Each structure stands twice: as C-alpha cells, then as structure tokens.
C-alpha cells in the first residue's frame, strides 16, 4: 500500500487580508488551515518548521478526541491537526486555540474571540466551520496514515 502525500501550502491567500500576528493561513487538500505566526519554532509561540512529517491518528486526552498527530517534529511534541478558530500571537494581544498545532476549516473569516477576564478582543482572522471540516477530513483520509509536506510561502522576487 502506497501512503498518500498531502501538501499544506502556507501563505497569503488571495482576498484574505490579515496581519502576521493573526496567524499563518494556508491550504490543505481543499481545506483552509491556520497556524501560529513564525517565531523560530518556539514551543507554544510558533508554527512548526516547514518539512515532511508522518501523520497518524492518535487520541488526544487534551482534546478528548482522535486527531491526526504529526510525528517526529523537531523540538516539539503533540502537534496535531484539529478543530479551532484562532491562531493569533498571544504575546501580541491576539487570541489562539493552539500552541503550535494546525487548525482546519472550510473557509476563512473574521470573528471576535471570547472575552478572557478583562481582555476584550477585536475581530481577527479565523478558520470557519472547523468542526465539520475536521470531521470531513478524518472521513476523507479514512484514518489512514499519510505524509504531510508543509511548504512555506514562496519568496517574492
């Protein structure tokens, strides 16, 4: 059996205005993705480095569900593809549902994160319909392992 390879292309998507601290939009096999900004692979603050990773289904006690987990991510542990809306830079005042994982959705939008204590957020970039997107992705992949190739945005010349 030949393992499928999927490509996650990071970068600015046409028509999606965003500021870098709001996260890194991308696309994965017809789905939208959102990751933390690039902060040199710093745990809990940064997206992971571009590269090729084996993805297998494991159970997440934190999320209380089975999701795809990226294996052997240098300097990181338990990096998953999962549901959520926001991947903003918390030190820059943005809200985030991740500490390095990849959020998946059906589209992009701008929505306001929930108030946290005294912190009131402004609308920020988000992936939409994340729960149904994750369900669709898991069904499409039939829980089979796959190789994920993550590509950084092309450098503008």
Image (cartoon, rainbow, N blue to C red):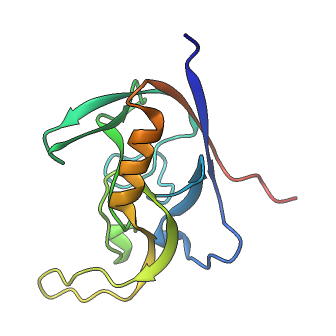
Q: Is residue 71 above or below residue 38?
A: above
Q: Position of residue 86 (x, y in %)?
A: 37, 68
Report if residue 102 is visible in the image: no
Judge by depth and name the residue closer to the eye, 146 or 39: 146
Image quadrant containing the C terminus: bottom right
Report if residue 92 is visible in the image: yes
Residue at image position (62%, 75%) is 16
Judge by depth and name the residue closer to the eye, 101 or 29: 29
Residue at image position (29%, 80%) is 113
Q: Position of residue 79 (x, y in %)?
A: 35, 39
Q: With 96 as the anchor, is 31 left or right in this view?
A: right
**Residue pushed farthest right?**
157
Judge by depth and name the residue closer to the eye, 154 or 93: 154
Q: With 14 as the anchor, is 127 left or right in this view?
A: left
Residue at image position (66%, 65%) is 12
Q: How many marks?
A: 0
Image quadrant containing the N terminus: top right
Judge by depth and name the residue closer to the eye, 127 or 22: 127
Q: Position of residue 146 (x, y in %)?
A: 50, 26
Q: Is residue 6 above or below residue 88?
A: above
Residue 75 found in image quarter: top left
Residue 77 found in image quarter: top left
């Amino acid at each position: 059996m030949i393992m499928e390879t999927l490509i996650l292309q990071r970068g600015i998507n046409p028509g999606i205005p965003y500021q870098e601290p709001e996260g890194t939009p991308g696309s994965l096999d017809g789905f939208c993705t959102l990751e933390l900004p690039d902060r040199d692979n710093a745990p809990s603050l940064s997206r992971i480095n571009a590269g090729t990773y084996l993805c297998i289904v494991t159970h997440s006690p934190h999320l209380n569900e089975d999701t795809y987990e990226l294996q052997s991510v240098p300097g990181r542990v338990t990096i998953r593809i999962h549901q959520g809306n926001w991947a903003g830079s918390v030190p820059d005042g943005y809200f985030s549902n991740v500490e390095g994982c990849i959020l998946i959705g059906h589209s992009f939008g701008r929505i306001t994160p929930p108030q946290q204590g005294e912190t009131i957020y402004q609308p920020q970039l988000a992936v939409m319909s994340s729960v149904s997107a994750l369900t669709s992705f898991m069904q499409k992949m039939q829980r089979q392992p796959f190789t994920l190739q993550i590509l950084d945005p092309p450098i503008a010349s």
